[in-house]
Every structure is written in structure tokens, then in C-alpha cells.
Image (cartoon, rainbow, N blue to C red):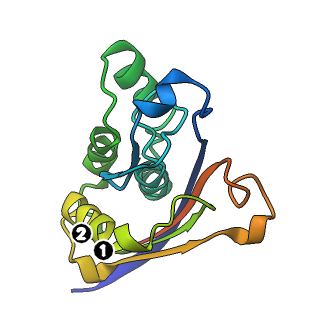
Amino acid sequence: MNYTYYQAIGQDSHRFININDSAASTSPLILGGIVIPSAVGIEANSDGDVLFHALTNAISGVTGVNILGKIADQMCLVDGVKDSRVYLERAMQDLKDIELIHVSFSIECLVPKLAPHIQDIKTSVASALNIAPSAVGITATTGEGLNGCGRGEGIAVLCVLSVRRPN
């Protein structure tokens, strides 16, 4: 079978909750569906899963259907859906005959240290996308403190998604 191959980029970033805010101690940090223990949560209407948001944006880049924005706002603010995995599932409905091949993430943050959690995040992402964990790449960097994420103010994620469609 012949295929046409595509790539798309998704990005998202969120600020950490102010540590003086009482919500900071009760809002977990979630990345790729995994709760990162002892980390400050993210300012967001939803669960703030910046990794799933970047992935959802990459899928929107393939399908041309923007989920984050009007659709996710409806789901979150009106219907009460806070789980970013549900937004991702909604985006995947628009893929139709498009097959996900590989996804790569670059995460920028000073804190928390992500190395102990990368394998769990890879496994969670692979499960959500129904691909092998070996088809999920994750790197993390502090960005040398050149921006707010590198100074510990939040997290930014860049996602590159590779897909194919039968001709």
C-alpha cells in the first residue's frame, strides 16, 4: 500500500499556580496523564496537562480541526470536562484514516525534574494514542534559564507528530 506522510507541530505552555495561592497545594501537576508528585500545579481551566494540550494541537495541525479553544472551552467550561485526555480523544476522532506513527516531545521547565517520570509519561501517551512506547520520544531541558519556563515559572511543551494516510 502507498502512503502519504505528514508531520505537524503542536505547542502549549502554562504558568505554575502561585505558591502563595491555596490552590497550589491541592492542584496536582499532570503531564501526559501522569501525576507528578510534590510538584506545583498549573494555572488552567482544565487539569492543565500541557503535554496532552501540545499533542492535541499537533493533531489539530494534521486534521485542520482546532480542538483547544472553542471546542475544549465548551467541554470544560460548560460541560465540566476537566480531563485533557478527553480533549485528546476528541481530536483523535477527526483523524479518520490517518495513522499515528511517532510523536516526539520537548519539555522545557526548571522544575520539577522530569527524568524519573519520563518512562511513565511515555507509557501513558502510547496508551492514549494506541502506539508502542518506542514510538514516543520525550526530552526535557531547563532552557538555561533564558525564559520564564527555564526560570521555574511554568512549563512549555513542543510536540512533533508524524502520521501517514493511505493513498
Q: Looking at the image, how many numbered discs can be counted on the residues?
A: 2
* Vertical order, 31 against 73 (above or below): below
User: Residue 152: x percent and y percent?
Assistant: 67, 53
Please name whichever residue, 25 or 92, is drawn nearer the observer in this view of the structure. Answer: 25
Q: Which residue is mark 1?
A: 119
User: Residue 12: x percent and y percent?
Assistant: 57, 50
Q: Are marks 1 and 2 in contact (CB under 8 Å)?
A: yes
In which quadrant is the N terminus drawn?
bottom left
| Secondary structure of the residue carrying numbered label 1 | helix
Three-letter code, disc 1: Gln
Alpha carbon of mark 1 to alpha carbon of mark 2: how far?
Answer: 6 Å
> In the image, 106: left or right of 151?
left
Q: In the rendering, which numbered label is found on residue 131?
A: none
The residue furthest right is 146
Identify the residue at horizontal 49%, vertical 72% (top origin). Answer: 7
Three-letter code, disc 2: Thr
Identify the residue at horizontal 50%, vertical 55% (top origin). Answer: 61
> In the image, 119: left or right of 115?
left
* Vertical order, 104 against 64 (above or below): below
Residue density around tag 1, few if under 14, some if 14–19, many if 20 or more, within 10 Å? some
Q: Quadrant of residue 59?
A: bottom left
Identify the residue at horizontal 48%, vertical 25% (top origin). Answer: 23
Please name whichever residue, 24 or 138, is drawn nearer the observer in this view of the structure. Answer: 24
> In the image, 40: left or right of 26?
right
User: Residue 56: x percent and y percent?
Assistant: 42, 50
Q: Which residue is mark 2?
A: 123
Q: Quadrant of residue 62?
A: bottom left
Q: Is residue 160 visible?
A: yes
